[in-house]
Amino acid sequence: MRRVLANMGLTALLILTGLASAQAEGFTVATTDGVFDSTQYQGKVIYVDFWASWCAPCRKSFPWMNEVQARYADDGLVIIAVNLDKEPALVKEFLNSTPADFLIGLDPEAELAEQFAILGMPSVRVFARDGSLQIEHVGFREKDKAAYEAGIKQLLEQP
Amino acid sequence: MMSLKTITLAACLLTSNVLAGCSVMGVQPWDRDLLAQRQMQIGEDALDLATDDHIYFSKEATSGGRGFGGGGCGCN
Amino acid sequence: MQLISDADSDRRSSGKVAGIASALAAASAQLIAAGGAQAEWDVNTSLMFYQEADGRVQDLSFKSLASTTRDNDDEITVGLQLDTLTGASPTGALARPEAQSFTRPSGRGEYTIAAGEHPQDNTFNDDRYDLSINWLRPYSQDLKLGLGASVSKEYDYLHLGLSAQAVRELNNKNTTLRLAIGLAQDENKPVGGVPRPLSEMQTTDTVLDRTSSDDKTIVDTVLGVTQVVSRRAIVQINYALSIANGYLNDPYKFLSVIDPVSGEADLSTSADRLAYVFEQRPDSRTGHNLYTEWRYRLDNSIANLSYRYHTDDWGIDSHTLEGRYRFLLDGGRYIEPHLRYYNQSEADFYAPFLANTAPLTEDASADYRLAAFTGTTIGAKYGRPVGKNGELGFRLEFYQTRGDDPDVPESLVAVNSYPDLSSVFGQVSYRFSW
């Protein structure tokens, strides 16, 4: 009887851990030079931005993401901007006129976008150092830049 | 000549039916690439339309009813 | 429309309008200047000429629309339009086998129309300017509210307008709902004053039966839905209600008074010329518009189809069907042919003439624009990119109207066909970011 209970308890614990780690499990996405695997960035704060060349607010967010990546790289911030364009030529054109000093993911089939169930463009998902999803928002607004940065700082301060 | 009551009822019915239908139509945010192009947006030719409307307003007995924006990239 | 003449009485109202217009212009200039560090204005400008055959109306128009999104996401649009219009327009009187003379609207002097010629007032010269501003602010992810104002002024006409709108997005921004309401107050101050409706045209040197000006108020409401149908298709449906009250006549239009059988013209009360009576329209008009537009993106082209149905309590129903097909060429250039078909029924009170057997109490207007007719437009636009963000456009359109000849007595049929319109208009437009 005690064994059965212990088994049930262990199973329950495993299920709970499984649920928690489903988010902490990580994700992969192709990049401009290889593959990005989030499990290789354990202990870092990962900022995932979904964008496309035809999205005007996305264009406005790039200079800000460049600033933020540079400012917090040493503190452990990794930004990866996942592109959802269907035509690679448009991505090249965009990056030529709007340079990015952070990782660029490529998701033309929108597989990662669907996995993350994004609802609008641009969309942001920020993962804490333990891999759990902590921040999500839709849209990029100039007036909210300070708030976005505060959110990132808070996650960087956590162990 | 429709009474105001009839008009209001018709407008409500039209709106609710249209909205009910609208909720099953649409695309995912990442599929707005073509609609994001300026040429696909209703009202992008506002200048040309204003020119035309100005001419037709002075030559014809009816005018108005035209469009506004909506659609586009759906960003922000 | 008005005649070239002295401007004494206009100085007062010009002063008031100048005040409103300069306030509007100052506000616009301030907005343009204070856009914010990253403000970018999308500006679209055009020059258009319009010319009717047979020496009728000619118009030259400059138009500019500028819009921007500020740092706080407010969307601002400013519009300016300048027109200069000259030419002649049918007055509503019938052509006769003999010459006719008419008093100029100012009451000073006459003009003569030759035998068999369609009476037109041929000394119109009108300059008009139009200013508008619109401000739209987001209040949440899916709701925007806005206000707008407009003013337009021509020599004998003043328009002031205010509007408000609400835009709500649903279904992940696949559906956009819009409700707009507008209020306009227009003042008609024709040269020579407003003739009393159905009063007789006087010869010069007589005291004219007139008031100096008259007003009208218009309330407009529009309810619209824009829906994303698929990755390639978008559709819009609008319902608009318009209610106008006040002075809705055209002060420069009149009707011939004749015997409905013989076609013989009556003499005026003073018996020194033929009888003409100024028109009278109802003092209210309620109209409904239902408009729909479809845009479809094919691989190398865009199809655009729209339809508008109009009905009102003046008995006028109209259908407008328009199609544009844009061929997308390389280098960002395009060619877009355009077709428009328009058909309207006649107004209940449309009458080619007044019968001297009928009482002079009912609404009547012989304005050819209230008759039943069909209009066809065929044209094309060519566009090409210029510089980094600019686009140059060239458009040429041919517009023709055809109406049934008015129902007039036998003796006047030969000289009274419907004044079919044949016109051409061209436009050069330049769009850029600033």
Image (cartoon, grey):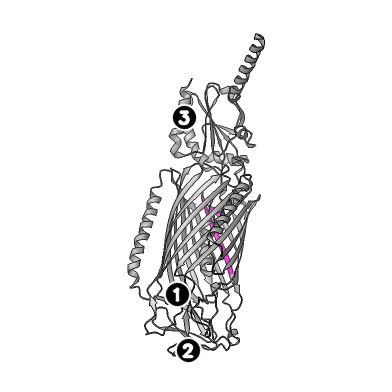
Q: Residue furthest bottom?
A: C271
Residue C346 in view of the camera: yes
Identified at 33% across, 69% down, the residue is C11
Label 3 marks which chain's residue?
A: A
Q: Which residues are magenta?
A: C384-399
Q: Position of residue A48 (x, y in %)?
A: 55, 31
Residue C251 circle label:
1
Q: Are marks 1 and 3 on the same chain?
A: no
Position of C2 relative to A131 (above/below): below
Within-10-Å neighbours for mark 2: few <14, some 14–19, many 20+: some
Residue A115, image x, y percentages: 62, 32
**Chain label for disc 2:** C
Q: Which residue is mark 2?
A: C267
On residue A151, the disc is: 3
Circle 3 packing at 10 Å, graded few (<14), some (14-19), many (20+), is few
Q: Closer to the observer: label 1 or label 3?
A: 1
> What type is the residue that disc 2 sits on?
Leu
Task: Give the CA distance from mark 1 to mark 3.
Answer: 67 Å
Q: Residue at x 62, y 41 (%)?
A: A87
Disc nearest the viewer among 3 and 2: 2
State which chain disc 1 sits on.
Answer: C
Name the amino acid, label 3.
Gly
Q: Residue at x 54, y 72 (%)?
A: C369
Label 3 near label 1: C-beta < 8 Å? no
* Residue C232 position within the rendered picture, expressed as x and y whole percent measured from the top left: 64, 48
> Which residue is at a point 37% across and 60% down the rendered structure image?
C21
